Amino acid sequence: MNMFCFQCEQTAQGKGCTVTGVCGKDAVTANLQDELTNAVIELANCPKKNEYITELIIKGLFITITNVNFDNESIIRFKQEVKQNISCNTNFDIKSVWNTDEDIRSLKSLILFGLKGIAAYAYHARVLGYKDNDIDNFFYEALQAVTKVNNITELTALVLKTGEINLKCMELLDKANTNTYGTPEPTKVTTNIEPGPFIVVTGHDLRDLALLLEQTKDLGINIYTHGEMLPCHAYPELKKYPHLKGNFGTAWQNQQKEFENIPAPVLFTTNCIMPVKDSYSDRVFTTSVVHYPGMTHIDDQKDFSLVIKKALELGGYPEKQKMTGINGGEVLTVGFGHAAVLSIADKIIDAVKTGALKHIFLVGGCDGAKPGRNYYTEFVKSTPANTVVLTLACGKYRFNDLELGHIGELPRLLDMGQCNDAYSAIKVAIELSKAFNCSVNELPLSLILSWYEQKAVCILLTLLYLGMENIRLGPTLPAFISPNILKLLVEKFKIKPITTARQDLKEILG
C-alpha cells in the first residue's frame, strides 16, 4: 500500500513519505488520517454549524498532527462519527490537493497544516472553557476555501489570515492558562529524580497535569514533567503541589532511549508520542487525542487510578538519580513569559540604551531527530556576552541547561514556555517596539526558528502575518513549499534558511 505525507520537517528525502512515515506511522495509518482529514473538510463544507460539529472539526484536525495518533481503530471510530454528521451532498478528494498545480498545492498545504496547529491550541483552550467565534468560524471558512479556491492571490491572503487567526488563538490559550493556573513566574527546575514512586507527564496539556497532581497528592508519588510540559513548573496553581518535583529527560525525540526500562508510568497528553518499545510498553498511558495500539487509554472522565496503580507497582528508583540536560546542566530555569519579561522591560530598555545589551535572539521551535539540529546549540553557545537569548518550545532542550550568565540582573537565557507561548515573544517584541518608537523589524531582534510539525507552521504564518522579516528557518525548508511560493516569501518577508551558526551570527551582527 502506498501513502503520501510531507507535513513534517523530517519527511523522507525532503520530498515526502511514500512507503512508511519517518515518524513511525505505516501506510494504513497515514491513509486513514487522510480519510479523516477528508471527512472533516466535507463536514466543514456543509451549511450546518453548531458547537458539536465545531468540536468534531477541531478534534479531527488535531488527531492528524504528526505523532499524535497511531491507533487505526480509534481513527476509524472518529472518522465514522464525523461522516455520520455530514448533512449535505459534498464530495471531496484530498488527493486533489496533493496532485494539483504545485503553487496551489503549496498554499493550500500552508493553510491546511496551519489549521491543524490552530486546532491543537483551540482544543487546549476549550478544555479550560475558553472559545472564540472568530476562531471557530475560520475553520469553516478555510476548509471551504481548500475545496473551492484556486486563485493564488486569494489563497495567499488566506495563508496570512491563518496566521492572524492563530495569533488570536494563542492569545486565547494564554488567557485560558493564566486565568486558570496563574501567571508564570521565573522558577528553577531540577533534572534529578528522587527515589520512590513517580509518574512522568509529557505533551502540552496543563489541565491533565493539574488533574493528575490533585489525584496523587498525599500518596507518596512524585510527578515529573517531560518535553513541552516543562513550563508547567512556572504556573503558581501547579507549582503549589510539593510533589511536582522536576523534569525528566529532554525533548520528545529522545523518549525511546530515555524511557528504556523506566521504573515509572508515562502519561502522554498530546503529541509527540513515538513508536513504543517493548521495554516500557506496559507503562505507557495515553489520554485526550493521543492513542497508540495496545496502550491503555484514559478517557475523558480523567480517572488516573490505573496510572497511579502502575506507579506504586513499579516503585521508582531505589536511590536518587543524577540526570542532566544534553550539555550536562542539572537546573533549568523557566517562567519568563510576557508578564515576567515586561516586568523588567525598563532594565532591558536601559541595557539597550547604554550599550550593555546589543542584540536579542529568539531561538526556538520544535526539536527533532534529523541531523542538523546541533546548529541551534552551537548558535546559542556562540552568542556574545552582550546579547540575550529568548527561547520557547522543545527546541530549547538543545541548550536550555547551559549557563550563559547575566547582563546586570538580566539572565541571558530566558525560557518563555511552550510552542504556543510564541504569543509571549510576539507581545514582548511589540511592546519593546513601542518603547523604542520603531517597528518590530527595526529592533535589535533576530528570529532563529526550528520546525518539525504543524504547530510550528501556524506560528510561522503568524510571524508572516505580523510582517516580521529576516526569519531564519531550519533545519530544512518545508517540502510542501514550491519554488515560486518560496520566492514570494523571500522577496516579501526576507525569510531564509539557516546556514552555519558562525556564518549566520556574523551576518546578523554585522
Image (cartoon, grey):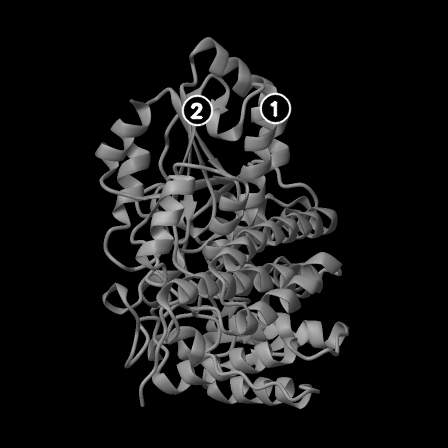
Please name the amino acid that badge 1 sits on.
Answer: Lys
- Residue located 57% across and 68% down the image: 145
Per the model, the C-alpha gap separating discs 2 and 1 is 13 Å
Identify the mark nearer the N-term, 2 or 1: 1
**Image quadrant containing the C terminus:** top left
Residue 9 versus residue 328: which sits nearer the camera? 9
**Is 318 left, or right, of 463 in this rendering?**
left
Q: In this view, does 305 lie above or below 413?
A: below
Tell me the crowding category of disc 2: few under 14, some 14 to 19, or many 20 or more residues within 10 angstroms, Cα based. Answer: some
**Image quadrant containing the N terminus:** bottom left
Tell me the crowding category of disc 1: few under 14, some 14 to 19, or many 20 or more residues within 10 angstroms, Cα based. Answer: few
**Could you say where residue 22 lies in the image, as x and y percent from the top left?**
30, 71
List the single residue furthest toward the top: 354
**Could you say where residue 421 lies in the image, as x and y percent from the top left?**
56, 46
**Could you say where residue 240 lies in the image, as x and y percent from the top left?**
67, 47
Query: Label 2, on which residue?
Result: 444
Q: Is mark 2 on a helix, strand or loop?
A: loop
Query: Do residues under tags 2 and 1 come within 8 Å of each other at their CB atoms?
Result: no
**Is 185 left, or right, of 277 in this rendering?**
right
Query: Label 1, on which residue?
Result: 434
**Is 427 left, or right, of 64 in this rendering?**
right
